[in-house]
Amino acid sequence: MTTPAEPFALPMADQPRVRSDAARNRDALLCTAARMVAEEGAQAVTMDRLAAEAGVGKGTIFRRFGNRCGVMTAVLDESEAHFQTSVMSGPPPLGPGAPAYERLRAFGVARLAATLQRIDLIEAAGGGRSHAAYTFGVLHVRHLLVELGVEGDLPLLAAALLAPLEVPLLRAQIEVQHLPVARLEAAWCDLADRVVGARDQARG
Amino acid sequence: MTTPAEPFALPMADQPRVRSDAARNRDALLCTAARMVAEEGAQAVTMDRLAAEAGVGKGTIFRRFGNRCGVMTAVLDESEAHFQTSVMSGPPPLGPGAPAYERLRAFGVARLAATLQRIDLIEAAGGGRSHAAYTFGVLHVRHLLVELGVEGDLPLLAAALLAPLEVPLLRAQIEVQHLPVARLEAAWCDLADRVVGARDQARG
């Protein structure tokens, strides 16, 4: 009454446990790194301190993430995943359920806040948003532009709307020009108005 | 009949000759570096090759420019100065004499072309446009928006118009997405239309 041997089943049965141990270690490391970033800023996360606070050997961190930049990229990816979840299934107006134009404005304001909050982390992770995170933003804005009936080269309009929310410009506006965040939010919403054509509708 | 001694005049009289020797050396080095960039690309300019081609010692280059990044920054500044001259006093529509809206479109297209042409140089110079170059672009676009009677937060609208012309986005669009330059030009002009309100004027 024994089932026939299935050579494929053996690694399948074993892998989940191995994977879940690895995933648990990884989660613990990321969680510790994210807490350090939140409490003390990205510059506080050195490989030595992370190893000490997470209670693992430095070799483990290097094996898993390559280097400090790899750790920061993983923390950033995690944080980006939370942001995307709130856009895809969080409460309106950022999440679904609000009119497309309100969602567009909410997205710009939320993206601005998220980038400003993580500006040091983004730079510690190599200076650029990940390709996947960037693509998500373009696809979401493009989707909203379609819903709004905007005509034109929508992928490039979406990229143009996201361009003023990138780190180097924001850093110059906040740290060099000392512009208040509320002014950046208002300017972005005005830009979105102009791209969508909401200004003519209001005038007409 | 001798004029009274003027202690301030002595350094004034001497400095020009010293300066002009230094300036000549500097010009020769920059000219050689710019030729190498134009002919073989930024990666061809090593300190060894630059010293050999310009016929000067490597020490001279290090003293004058600090390091390779300093050389590249100086070449880029020189090239940016030519661009600014063509905007300020070159032929229309980029230079003065054309209607403001034609000048705005010409500026976007010319800035795009200039950035694409110098993309490796910009990265070799440290990855960012100089603060002065960026400020020039913002001031010029803002000036044209004023001429066009655009109302709003003009410095931030100008910054938003320039944002899609920065290196990281252009590099992704050209090298990863393989978008044709003509499509980027058309999309930028469409963005400018929307910001200026030219689209409503055309419709109304």
Image (cartoon, coloured by chain):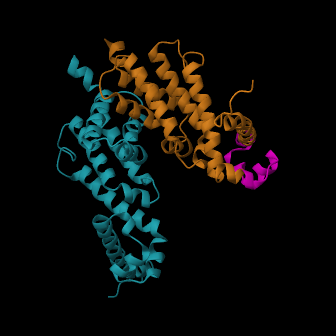
Chain colours: A orange, B cyan
Q: Which residue occupies 56% across, 15% down?
A: A92
Q: Which residues are magenta?
A: A32-60
- Image quarter in which the N terminus of chain A is found: top right
Residue B58 quadrant: bottom left
The residue that appears at 20% across and 45% down in the rendered structure is B96
Residue B179: horizontal and vertical position, in percent?
31, 41
Q: Quadrant of the C terminus of chain A?
A: top left
From the viewer's perspective, is A124 left or right of B111? right
Q: Residue at x 30, y 36 (%)?
A: B188
Q: How many marks?
A: 0
Q: Nearer the viewer, residue A160 or B141?
A: A160
User: Considering depth in this image, is A104 or A188 the residue closer to the camera?
Assistant: A104
Compared with B88, B100 (above or below) is: above
- Residue extending furthest bottom? B1
Q: Based on the picture, tell me whether residue A43 belongs to the magenta stretch.
A: yes
What is the x, y in percent for residue B102? 21, 37
Residue A93 image point, x, y percent: 54, 16
Secondary structure predominantly adopted by residues drawn in magenta: helix
**Residue B109 falls in image quadrant:** top left
Above or below residue B31? Residue A192 is: above
Choose top left, top right, bottom left or bottom right for residue A189: top left
At x 66% / y 47%, what residue is drawn?
A: A71
Q: Using the image as rendered, state which of residue B178 and residue A138 is in the foreground.
A: B178
Query: x, y (%) of residue A202?
Result: 36, 13
